[in-house]
Image (cartoon, coloured by chain):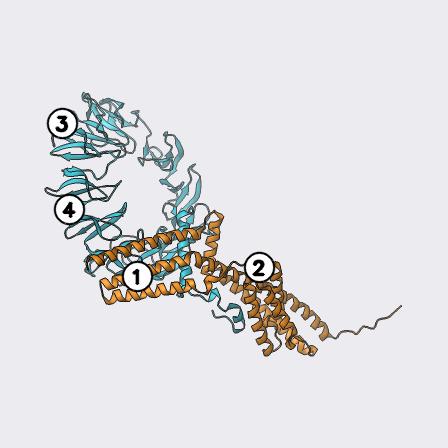
Chain colours: A orange, B cyan
């Protein structure tokens, strides 16, 4: 009968084990929230891109016609007010055009695979700046986490894996310190992570009540009723564009008539 | 609230960082407004009613509690998904002191805090509401931002993207005062002519407008499409409009192209055709004419010997009143409804009954000219609330119903038409109100101190406690009489409102 000699753990070591378990749980919860946030943000970004491509471009066209009308009116009936109105309307048209044709309009559909979601969850667990042991580590994790967010929103699993590999190979990821120091670090990390979870909840709430989320809610509610709200808004805007064109033509004819 | 530094990696380029003043942010707000308008146009709106409890106004749903708790000095009914409210006590009267108005959204939540001072509330139309600053009118959007800065001394609400606005005038005048009017678009830009004295509402794409030359019709470009060559003009109705012009100011009808459909030869002409005819006066004779001016009926003698009284619109019947000989009833096609033995003594058809006399006795005909109540009464008055007071002989007088039967306990009808298939009545004996169906059967017994007509399936009632509540079409109380005041149910024009659990 063999007898195994087991070293009895010190109270500090037992506490460290408990805290490591707790930290693992908190890491998991934080990673889930991060994933949820990244999902929602990517979905809204994708929705915004669709909105800008289907409806925004029409608003840009309408604003352009409005600006043309204001400019023509200012030339027909010159006054300080007319000139100011023309400038303001043109500025708005330019802003709309820029917003409509900017980076946001290029966002495509977001359908993350199970593997991608799993990778991101893993990245959030391992890379999160909350679990940094010092300032240098925090800076590294912040950079890598931002890259992981970008890779996830682009659906780039390869890049995400590369980031994880890079972190895994970095000397900062190697642990090695006394029990007391590690215990203090883990307690702080748990506290920081819990605070961060609360902050992410707030961000999720803010995102869910943002204008773009409410617009998506309206569109989805209409979709349930078999309606395409974007198509309806686009149709109305096209009518407004046609009306603006007519108004512009009337003005132009009037200008030509009066020489 | 700014993100904590360590969280910034999560929110770079975030949608959250957008504010409505950004071009992208305002584009999304714009989309939201358009989406709300589209939903309001097509989604079945939810019925709510304004109620007053403990001196404060709020909104309730049909059976789903408060949409807006009673916290307000006054609330206006919903319009375009928004309801104006004030925190101050308010009751509309002419010359009411200005109070501050804000707006509730279709969920009954404060969307715009009270900050617009006016003597009366202005509702939203097409996403914009008129507001006043320092005696000048402007317009705000549903998010409270300024759509058109205050610069007009007069403005109408927007309709189809167009409003009428005036400038100048006497700023101290207690009444609407302006120098000239013009049309404005949703950006506040004027377009078309800017020298209108009056512009009426658009109807069928055209609006009556008056300039110093006269009255004509403008289209949505703000230019005359029918020259201002008239002295008076009515709004377009069915592609026609009555105008008055030319010496000696006769009436005619014009079409949308301004061409006369009926030449301006009539001393009088009713403003619209109904069932293909209208009433006119030509060369001193009253007549009923068709759409091409053909006479369907012409009084044999000139006015004032023979004249056609105003049609009883609901029944399509008019009285041809004669100073000598027997008066009679005609319909809209000019057909004589009563024969020479009956004298139409009443110039108004009320409750589907017209008074006639034969050999000194009175009776009543219906809208087809049929004698439904025989000429047997010594005296008779016209129908009122479904009953007429008559005297049969020197011993008997009383109240008859529309079929000529004496009734000891009349049910006085409060409306001439049914609403939601029901008509209100007041019980003579019970001195309370209830409802009948089309056939005259009591559907809801008279048990209410006061009742109003049915609107959207519910009727407002005043309970014996003097408080207001609502009943359904079966007389079931769906909202207990508990409110000091209440108005009829109306549509919020807003999708998916959320109600609190209790009244």
Q: Are marks 1 and 3 on the same chain?
A: no
Residue A153 visible from this viewpoint: yes
Q: Secondary structure at mark 1?
A: helix
Instruction: Mark 2 or mark 1: name the one nearer the start of the chain.
Output: 1
**Can you give x and y, in whole percent of width and height, for residue B361 in the image?**
20, 22
Secondary structure under badge 4?
Answer: loop
Residue at mark 2 shares a chain with residue at mark 1:
yes
Measuring from the top left, give residue B167's x and y in whole percent.
Answer: 22, 60
Is B164 left, or right, of B18 in this rendering?
Answer: left
- The disc numbered 3 marks a residue on which chain? B
Circle 3 Cα neighbour tier, 10 Å, few/some/many (<14 / 14–19 / ≥20) = few
Q: For mark 2, what is the residue?
A: A112
Q: CA distance from mark 4 to mark 3?
A: 31 Å
Q: Nearer the viewer, mark 1 or mark 3?
A: 1
Residue picked out by circle 3: B300
Look at the numbered discs 2 and 3 and tell me whether their residues touch, using CB distance below 8 Å: no
Number of other residues with Cα within 10 Å of mark 2, as a class: few under 14, some 14 to 19, many 20 or more? some
Of tags 4 and 3, which is closer to the observer?
4
Give the Cα distance between marks 1 and 3.
64 Å
Disc 2 is attached to a residue of which chain? A
Name the one closer to the observer, B498 or A60. A60
- Return the residue at label 4: B231
Q: Which residue is mark 1?
A: A68
Left or right: where B478 falls relative to B183: right
Report the chain holding disc 1. A
- In the displayed structure, would residue A194 be above or below residue B84? below
Please identify, in this view, whether the residue under mark 2 or under mark 1 is nearer the observer.
1
Disc 3 element: loop
Q: Residue furthest left?
A: B248
- N-terminal label among 4 and 3: 4
Front residue of B333 and B255: B255
To which chain does the residue with label 4 belong?
B
């Amino acid at each position: 009968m063999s007898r195994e000699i087991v070293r009895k753990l010190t109270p500090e070591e037992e506490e460290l084990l408990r805290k490591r378990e707790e930290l693992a749980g908190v890491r998991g919860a934080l990673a889930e929230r991060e994933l949820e946030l990244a999902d929602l943000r990517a979905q809204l970004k994708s929705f915004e891109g669709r909105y800008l491509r289907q409806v925004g471009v029409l608003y840009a066209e309408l604003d352009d016609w409005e600006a043309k009308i204001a400019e023509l009116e200012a030339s027909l009936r010159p006054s300080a007010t007319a000139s100011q109105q023309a400038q303001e309307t043109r500025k708005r048209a330019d802003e709309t055009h820029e917003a409509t044709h900017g980076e946001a309009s290029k966002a495509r559909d977001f359908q993350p695979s199970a593997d991608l979601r799993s990778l991101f969850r893993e990245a959030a667990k391992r890379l999160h700046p909350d679990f940094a042991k010092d300032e240098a580590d925090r800076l590294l994790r912040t950079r890598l986490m931002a890259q992981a967010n970008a890779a996830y929103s682009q659906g780039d699993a390869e890049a995400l894996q590369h980031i994880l590999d890079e972190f895994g190979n970095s000397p900062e990821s190697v642990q090695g310190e006394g029990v007391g120091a590690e215990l203090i670090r883990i307690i702080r990390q748990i506290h920081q992570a819990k605070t961060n979870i609360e902050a992410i909840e707030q961000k999720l709430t803010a995102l869910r009540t943002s204008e773009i989320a409410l617009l998506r809610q309206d569109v989805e509610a209409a979709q349930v009723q078999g309606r395409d709200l974007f198509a309806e808004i686009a149709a109305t805007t096209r009518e407004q564009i046609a009306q603006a064109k007519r108004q512009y033509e009337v003005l132009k004819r009037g200008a030509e008539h009066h020489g | 609230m700014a993100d904590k530094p360590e969280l910034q990696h999560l929110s770079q380029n975030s949608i959250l960082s957008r504010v409505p003043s950004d071009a992208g942010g305002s584009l999304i707000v714009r989309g939201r407004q358009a989406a709300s308008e589209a939903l309001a146009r097509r989604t079945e709106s939810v019925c709510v009613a304004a109620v007053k409890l403990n001196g404060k106004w709020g909104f309730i749903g049909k059976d789903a509690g408060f949409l807006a708790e009673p916290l307000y000095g006054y609330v206006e009914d919903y319009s375009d998904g928004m309801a104006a409210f004030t925190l101050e006590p308010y009751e509309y009267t002419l010359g009411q002191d200005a109070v501050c108005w804000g707006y509730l959204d279709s969920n009954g939540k404060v969307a715009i805090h009270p900050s617009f001072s006016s003597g009366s509330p202005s509702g939203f139309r097409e996403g914009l509401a008129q507001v006043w600053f320092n005696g000048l009118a402007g317009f705000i959007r549903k998010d409270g931002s300024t759509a058109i800065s205050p610069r007009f001394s007069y403005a109408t609400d927007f309709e189809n993207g167009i409003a009428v606005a005036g400038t100048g005038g006497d700023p101290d005048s207690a009444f609407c005062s302006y120098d000239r009017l013009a049309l404005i678009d949703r950006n506040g830009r004027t377009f078309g002519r800017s020298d209108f004295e009056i512009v009426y509402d658009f109807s069928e794409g055209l609006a009556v407008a008056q300039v110093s030359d006269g009255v004509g019709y403008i289209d949505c470009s703000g230019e005359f499409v029918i020259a201002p060559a008239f002295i008076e003009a009515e709004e377009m109705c069915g592609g026609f409009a009555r105008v008055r012009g030319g010496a000696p100011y006769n009436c005619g009808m014009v079409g949308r192209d301004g061409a006369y459909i009926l030449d301006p030869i009539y001393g009088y002409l009713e403003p619209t055709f109904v069932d293909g005819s209208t009433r006119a006066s030509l060369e001193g004779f009253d007549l009923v004419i068709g759409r091409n001016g053909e006479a369907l009926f012409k009084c044999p003698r000139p006015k004032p010997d023979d004249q056609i009284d105003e049609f009883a619109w609901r029944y399509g019947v008019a009285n041809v009143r004669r100073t000598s000989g027997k008066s009679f009833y005609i319909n809209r096609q000019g057909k004589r409804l009563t024969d020479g033995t009956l004298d139409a003594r009443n110039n108004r058809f009320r409750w589907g009954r017209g008074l006639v006399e034969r050999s000194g006795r009175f009776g009543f005909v219906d809208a087809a000219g049929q004698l439904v109540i025989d000429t047997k009464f010594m005296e008779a008055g016209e129908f009122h609330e479904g009953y007429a007071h008559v005297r049969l002989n020197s011993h008997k007088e009383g109240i008859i119903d529309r079929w000529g039967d004496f009734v000891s306990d009349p049910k006085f009808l409060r409306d001439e038409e049914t609403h939601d298939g029901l008509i209100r009545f007041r019980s003579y004996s019970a001195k309370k109100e209830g409802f009948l169906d089309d056939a005259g059967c009591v559907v809801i017994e008279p048990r209410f101190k006061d009742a109003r007509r049915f609107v959207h399936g519910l009727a407002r009632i005043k309970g014996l406690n003097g408080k207001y509540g609502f009943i359904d079409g079966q007389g079931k109380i769906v909202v207990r009489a508990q409110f000091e005041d209440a108005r009829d149910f109306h549509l919020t024009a807003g999708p998916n409102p959320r109600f609190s659990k209790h009244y």
